[in-house]
Image (cartoon, rainbow, N blue to C red):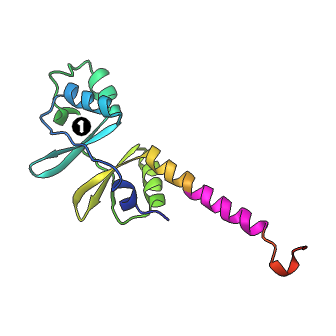
Amino acid sequence: MRSVRAIVEAQETVTVGPRWTVLDAARVMARLQIGAVPVVDEGGLTGIFTERDVLARVIAASLDPAATSVADVMSTDLVTAEITEAYDLCLQRMQQAHVRHLIVVDRGRLAGVLSLRDLLAVDLDEKDEAIALLNSYVHYVPADLRKS
């Protein structure tokens, strides 16, 4: 079973600062085609800024993205996972919390971000491997029983 470490080590973690404008953060997210970015300042991780934050807290509230700081609209109630956890526990945690992005920490420090898409892809790979193993087991014929 793949650990979270194996998934996040293959990714680059992009962060923004709390004083960034929503417009600047959204442009970075759009350019990189990512749905969330951790918000980090000198003291470390302070929140996460997501597509949902843009929609619910900026657009729906009629705020100006060029004049609104990320700190004013980011999510601060963080759902996290330790880097040593198995992917399936993280998937369960995301489903229970109704979030699509999970902050990954390594001994309290930001290590990366997992998306629901990342975890579902790993889950699918794991299931494909299990199916292949079960198929080979079901179709296995011992050498002494094979017809020559």
Image point (28%, 28%), residue name: 57
Q: Residue furthest bottom?
A: 144
Image: 122 above or below 60: below
Tally of numbered discs = 1
Side of 55 relative to 96 (left or right): left
Name the spot of residue 49 as percent of width and height, x first: 27, 38
Image point (10%, 52%), residue name: 43
Circle 1 packing at 10 Å, graded few (<14), some (14-19), many (20+), is: many
SS majority, magenta: helix
Quarter where residue 146 is shown: bottom right
Image point (36%, 53%), residue name: 10
Name the spot of residue 61 as percent of width and height, x first: 27, 22
Side of 99 relative to 32 (left or right): right
Tell me the kind of residue under disc 1.
Met
Which residue is disc 1 drawn over?
Answer: 74
Image point (27%, 58%), residue name: 105
Q: Residue furthest front?
A: 148
Q: Is residue 96 magenta?
A: no
Secondary element under disc 1, as helix, strand or loop, is loop
Q: Quadrant of the C terminus?
A: bottom right
Q: Residue furthest right?
A: 147
Q: Is residue 135 magenta?
A: yes
Quarter where residue 82 is shown: bottom left
Task: Tell me where the magenta segment starts and ends, as one range.
Answer: 126-139
Name the spot of residue 33 as percent of width and height, x first: 35, 33
* Residue placed most toward the observer, 10 or 37: 10
Name the spot of residue 112 as percent of width and height, x first: 29, 52
Image: 35 above or below 86: above
Side of 3 relative to 107 (left or right): right
Image: 135 above or below 12: below
